[in-house]
Amino acid sequence: MRPALVAALASALLAASAGARNYPSKPVRIVVPFAASGGTDIMARSLALAMSPALGQPVVVENRPGANGIIGADVVAKAPADGHTLLLTTNAYTTSPSLYAKLPYDTERDFSPITLAGSAANLLAVHPSLPARSVKELIALARARPGQLTLSASGAGTPSHLAGELLKQTAKLDILVIQYRGTGASLNDLIGGQVSMTFGALPGLAPFVKSSRLRALAVSSPARNAALPEVPALAEMLPGFEVLTWYGLLAPAQTPKSVIERLHREVVAALAGSEVRERLAAQGYDPGGMLPEQFAALIRTDLARWRTVIRAAGIHLE
C-alpha cells in the first residue's frame, strides 16, 4: 500500500476516533417520520427527555411525516454519520421495501441499527353484534360466510392492513379488507357496526373494549398482555402468529461503533428509569433495549417475513 494512502487512512481513523470521544458535540436530533402525538412521537419524546441530561446536550424531536415513514427516513439516511441525527421509526421501515417499487435509500445498507426501544401489541377487536366471542368462533363464522365479513384498516400497507392479511393467509379465510384514510375513520365505522372487525394498537382500542363498545378477541403478541390479561393471544389458536408494532432507533450508516454503543447504553438507561418506564407502560408499550446486532437481525427477519405476506396479498403502493 502506498505511503500516501496509508497516511490518509490513518488520518481518517484518528478523526473518527476523536469525533467519537467528543460525542455529542452539539444537540442530537431524533427524526420521527410520522405526525406528532402518535405512538412513535410519544416514544421519541420520552427518550429525549431522559437522554438529554446523560448526553450533556439537548435531544430534540423533529417530526417529518409522509409516505409511510419514507420521507423522514430519507432525511436521516443522507445526514452526516456522526450520531447527531437519528431515526426513530416503526416496523413500517421493514414493510416499505416490499410495498413500494423504489425507495430513495437502501434499508439495509444506509442505516446503522442502535436498538429496539419498545413494542406494542395489536388487538383483534370485533363489533359486539358479531356472533363470535373467540378466535375459534370467528374463524368458523368467516368460513361459513366467505367474503361477507369485513375488516377495517387504517390505510394501505399499515400495520392494521398487514395484520389482517396475515390473519387471512394464516387461517385461510376469505375476509374483505376495507381501506380507510386514517385510524379515526376506520374505528368510527367499526364502532358504528358498518364493518365486522379490525386490528389496532392495544392502547388505542382498550378504552372501547372496557366500555363494551368493542369486543376483544385476541392480542397479536406471542403471549397475553398485562393490560388485558383475560384476552388470549392469537398464537394460542394460530401458533406462530405475531404482529407487534415496534419502535426502533437507527443512525446513518458508517456512524462510529463507539457512538452506536454510547447511544444504546443511554437508551437502555432511559428505559430503565421509573418515569419513562411508567409513562410507556401506561400507554401499553413493552420496553426494549436489545443490542444493535440483535436489532439488525430483527430487521432482516421482518424484511423477509413481510415480503412474503405482501407478495401473497398482491399489495403495491405508488
Image (cartoon, grey):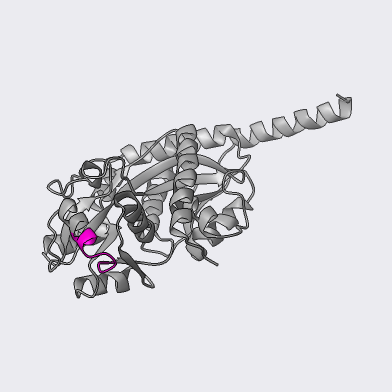
Question: In the image, 68: left or right of 193?
Answer: right
Asked if residue 148 lies in the magenta stretch, the reply is yes
* Pick the front one: 23 or 114: 114
- Report if residue 202 is visible in the image: no
Which residues lie in the magenta part? Answer: 141-150
Compared with 189, 282 (above or below) is above
**207 or 125, which lies in front?**
125
Q: Where, quadrant-wise, is the N terminus in this rendering?
A: top right
- Residue 230 seen: yes
Where residue 24 appears, x then y in whole percent? 55, 42
The residue depicted at 51 percent of the width and 58 percent of the height is 99
Residue 247 painted magenta: no
Q: Which of 155 and 253 is in front in this view?
A: 155
Image location of residue 5, percent across then percent down: 84, 30
Horizontal side of 139 relative to 253 (left or right) equals left
Q: In this view, does 95 lie to the left or right of 281?
A: right
Q: In which quarter of the image is residue 173?
A: bottom left
Q: Where is residue 94 in the image (x, y as percent from the top left)?
A: 48, 50
- Residue 202 against residue 252 in the figure, above or below: below
Q: Which residue shows up at 12% across the image and 69% down it? A: 129
* Quadrant of image for the C terminus: bottom right
* Left or right: 211 as drawn, with respect to 61: left
Residue 101, quarter of picture: bottom right
Res 54 quadrant in image: top left
Q: Position of residue 192 (x, y in %)?
A: 20, 75
Please determine whether, in this image, residue 155 is positioned above or below residue 47: below
